[in-house]
Image (cartoon, rainbow, N blue to C red):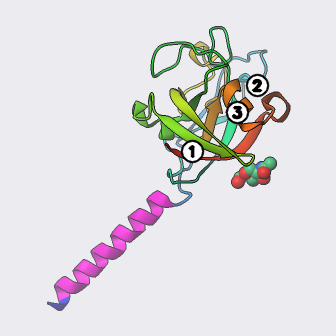
Amino acid sequence: MLRSTSGLLLLAIAASHLLLAAAGAGCGPSGTLRPTQSHACQDCCKAGQAYPTYRCSPPVSSSTRAVMTLNDFDEGGDGGDPSECDGAFHRSSERVVALSTGWYSGGSRCGKNIRIRANGRSVLAKVVDECDTVNGCDREHAFQPPCRNNVVDASQAVWDALGITGEEVGEYNITWSDA
Ligand SMILES: *[C@@H]1O[C@H](CO)[C@@H](O)[C@H](O)[C@H]1NC(C)=O
């Protein structure tokens, strides 16, 4: 009786540690990308630099903290290939976002809205793409480094709706949730 109780207790402690580990800040880099070629474009990969890669993102809550960046999802834009979800390009007047690989979650949020809160405002934006945290520095990713694991890469229309000037600040702390 005593033995089984302490066994259960141990199990409970082990389970709570697992939960803590899953919910904690414990989403560290999974590797490093070291490109052999430099590319001259803005923010592009440089030979000899080490870029961390991630296979996870922080846990999603009703108020998930993230860094919003500006992306051009249109053909010839800095987004690279067509959007991962629908194989299409998107105009900057559409409210669309790409999420870091962990949050993209194998496409499970494709076509769904997330709610972004920033600057005292709130806007719905559709998930159309992945901000790849595992791969980068190649043509498919417009020679951009792998994404950080906490990025909501948003179109101009999203920035506009939030009343933030993307070109000036480059990135902006936001919170988001599933809508
Ligand atoms: C954005 O958030 C990060 C991490 O929480 C923090 O270190 C940084 O100071 C914040 N930046 C601004 C401009 O508030």
Image quadrant containing the N terminus? bottom left
Q: Which residue is mark 2?
A: 43
Span highlighted in magenta in the image: 3-23
Q: Is label 3 or label 1 in front? A: 3
SS category of the residue bearing label 2: loop
Give the residue furthest to the top: 76
Q: Residue at x 67, y 23 (%)?
A: 144
Inter-mark Cα distance, 3 to 2: 26 Å
Q: Is label 3 or label 2 in front? A: 3
Task: Say whether disc 3 or disc 1 marks the residue closer to the N-terminus.
Answer: 1
Q: Main secondary structure of the magenta part?
A: helix
Q: In front here: 137 or 127?
A: 127
Q: In front here: 157 or 5?
A: 157
Does residue 6 appear anywhere in the picture?
A: yes
SS category of the residue bearing label 1: loop
Label 2: how many residues lie within 10 Å, few (<14), some (14-19) or many (20+)? few
Q: Residue at x 66, y 8 (%)?
A: 76
Q: Residue at x 63, y 22 (%)?
A: 137
Give the number of the disc on residue 161. Answer: 3
Q: Which residue is mark 1?
A: 29
Mark 3 residue type: Ala
